[in-house]
Amino acid sequence: MLNFERKGNGKEVLVLLHGFMENISIWDDMEPHLSENFTLLKIDLPGHGQSEILAEVHTMELMADEVKKVLDDQNLNKIHLLGHSMGGYTSLAFAEKYPDMLKSLTLFFSTYFPDDDEKRQQRIKSYRIIQDAFSHYAKAGIPNLFNPNERDILEGKIETALEIALSTNNMGALACVKGMVERTDKKHILENLEAKILILAGKHDNAVKTENTIRNLPDRTNVKSYVLDCGHNGHWEKPAICAEIINTELLHNMPKNLIF
């Protein structure tokens, strides 16, 4: 079973899924700001953190099934699910397979669109370098995930992100890249899911096409979006603001489509 950490005794269970080359420690900056009304369940996805590699290809559906096993082990059947980047892709797969388990679905600097042809080819070309020169791959990519206008301010956070990335098993990372290449369009999830749907996005996100993601959201009362002045890593760049939105939105209500 996947490695996980459970914290708190709040009535509402918030399951946190990290992104590619990350682990459960990415939530450390946000955690103090999250409401005590949440019980937090932080999970290391397959091949990341302390979770083992499970297959040559970690599809989003495979990872969603592994998350389900953790929830079953913890006797949880009604949750709030939040996923960062790849964790968001996994969350969408979970929502497709187990919609009745969700009170809410939060795409945290993630998207429901599959890779376009250019991004898919970039991932395929990265297979060899991930396998043979992983540290170079991580060092070249991680800084670009942060707001380029605040690189000096975020230097310490970039170093933390890089340390976490370099601690990732390169073959686990490779299995997940292969899984991300296979992703399909999940817009229908947002069009049909009855649970509350929340999208947090960054103006300067170089990994996700924020404008495209926000512009094509279905016009439904249960779908809300927020665009922040940051890059791909709101949990490090704007942890207090991200937590405030999550607390207020998932536990109460906020006006629709705000820009912070």
Image (cartoon, rainbow, N blue to C red):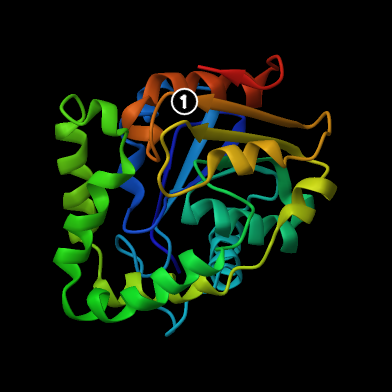
Q: Residue at x 55, y 63 (%)?
A: 115
Q: Mark 1, residues whose alpha carbon is within 10 Å: few (<14), some, or many (≥20)?
A: many
Is 2 positioned to the left or the right of 108 in the image?
Answer: left
- Can residue 31 be seen by looking at this rendering? yes
Residue 205 point in image, percent of width and height: 42, 40
Residue 90 point in image, percent of width and height: 56, 59
In the picture, residue 113 is in which quadrant?
bottom right
- Seen from the viewer's position, the closer of residues 61 and 12 is 61
Q: Secondary structure at mark 1?
A: helix
- Can residue 180 be seen by looking at this rendering? no
Q: In the image, what residue type sits under mark 1?
A: Cys
Q: Residue at x 29, y 77 (%)?
A: 171
> Looking at the image, is 24 positioned above or below residue 96?
above
Residue 25 point in image, percent of width and height: 30, 44
- Seen from the viewer's position, the closer of residues 82 and 78 is 82
Residue 40 point in image, percent of width and height: 48, 38
Q: Residue at x 56, y 73 (%)?
A: 62
> Looking at the image, is 39 positioned above or below residue 114?
above
Q: Residue at x 54, y 69 (%)?
A: 117
The residue identified by callout 1 is 242
In the picture, residue 249 is in which quadrant?
top right
Is 124 positioned to the left or the right of 193 in the image?
Answer: left
In the picture, residue 251 is in which quadrant?
top right
Give the position of the N terminus as an image quadrant. bottom left
- Seen from the viewer's position, the closer of residues 68 and 117 is 117
